[in-house]
Image (cartoon, rainbow, N blue to C red):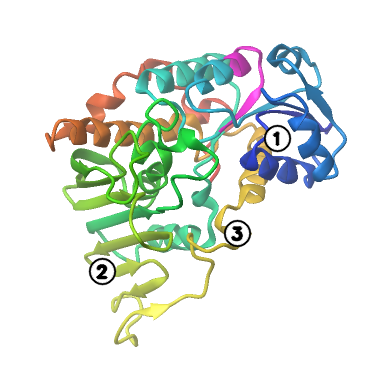
Amino acid sequence: MASLGVGILGAGWVAGEYVKAFRDLPQTEVAGLYSRTPGRASELLQALGVEAREYFQEEELFDDPAVDIVVSCTPPEVRPRHVVRAAETGRHVVIEKPVSLSMAGVEKIRQAVASSGVKTVTSFVLRWNPMIETIRRLVDDGIIGELIYAEADYWNPGNPARPQPWWVTKSGAGSAFLEGGCHAADAIRYLAGEVAEVSAVSCPAKRSELYEYDPIVVASLTFENGAVGKTSTVLDAETPYTFNIRLFGTDGTIQNNRVFSPKHYPGALDYWEFPTILPDTSDVAHHPFSREISHFVECITADVESHASIHDTYKSMALVFAIDESAASGGRPISVAEVGEVVDRATAPDPAARGGATLS
């Protein structure tokens, strides 16, 4: 198979991770990068030892016949325009998170992808984190039985004065869950199942006056199977970066990399711990872009949908927007399905109609 050419929109840190991932895959070749800052793309390519074009205009990337895959690493407010353009020109797309700052933007992307039939992967990259992958396998193997209660938390205070001020603005980041908490929203869907209803509250920053949105949000959840749970985002507190997953079931419980299930492990008197790479470590496997991209290229080659395609992850975004809507109303219960209905489901393809089952 001929190499798949890759065009990347953006030249920041995350773009560099994609350059490395595609550089190291024999099936792909970086065709070029576009940045709004002239020269920045060339600097990044040179630093990573990649010979490719610097596109000085967006049009150059979309007009380049060598580009088969477009990677959107630009700010989320312009992502729908870029992803729709890529889909309409027949390019497969890597969609950084958040997919959009509005559910209407998610709708535009999903409809364009459904109409064109191109493949997509949304970069909820923690789906490829080793701990998350192991938990998913344990859940699929029935270790916890029927879900009773679930939690997912994204606590990443960072430094609001760092040189990316858009992270603290409503126009740039949108909200705490859009900025980073969407990882927790996606993880709880992926591991615990679909959420039916949310009720969320938030509070303003205590440490920094730079945030234009409430950086602390907690949402209570009711799942479609009747289970309950909660998810939270904390961007303004004195704490190390922490990502929690807790799943309580009729047959057992998983708390991050600790498992208790007497039904399946009758000799265990307490939690046992499986060694893994946690999703809050500084190790590169925390953000395993190379595994995500290898998976995506496999999906393209096999003509199957990714388990993290836009046809699945629009539901994670609907959960995020439901949380934001509830928090803005002071905790009013919001139906996630009603938020998601802004997306015309009639346009969604059956994964089996294009190359078989979804690839996980």
The reply to whether the C-beta atoms of the residues labelled 1 and 2 are less than 8 Å apart is no
Magenta highlight on residue 94: yes
Which residue lies at the image location 60% right of the left edge and 12% below the top edge?
A: 88
Q: Real-space Cα distance between discs 1 and 2?
A: 39 Å
Horizontally, is 252 left or right of 114 in the view? left
Q: Is residue 239 magenta?
A: no
Label 1 sits on a secondary structure element that is helix
Name which residue lies at 34% across and 46% down. Answer: 208
* Mark nearer the viewer, 3 or 1: 3
Q: CA distance from mark 3 to mark 2?
A: 30 Å
Q: Amino acid at mark 1?
A: Thr
For the N terminus, the image quarter is top right
Q: Which residues are magenta?
A: 85-95
- Between marks 3 and 1, how big is the CA–CA gap? 24 Å
Q: Is residue 243 above or below residue 198?
A: below
Q: Nearer the viewer, residue 355 or 251?
A: 251
Q: Residue 301 bears which disc, if any?
A: 1
Would you identify the image quadrant in which residue 142 lies?
A: bottom left
Mark 3 against mark 2, which lies toward the viewer?
3
Q: Quadrant of residue 359?
A: top right
Asked if 355 appears above or below 264 in the picture, the reply is above
Q: Label 3: which residue?
A: 285
User: Pointer 2: what residue?
Assistant: 251
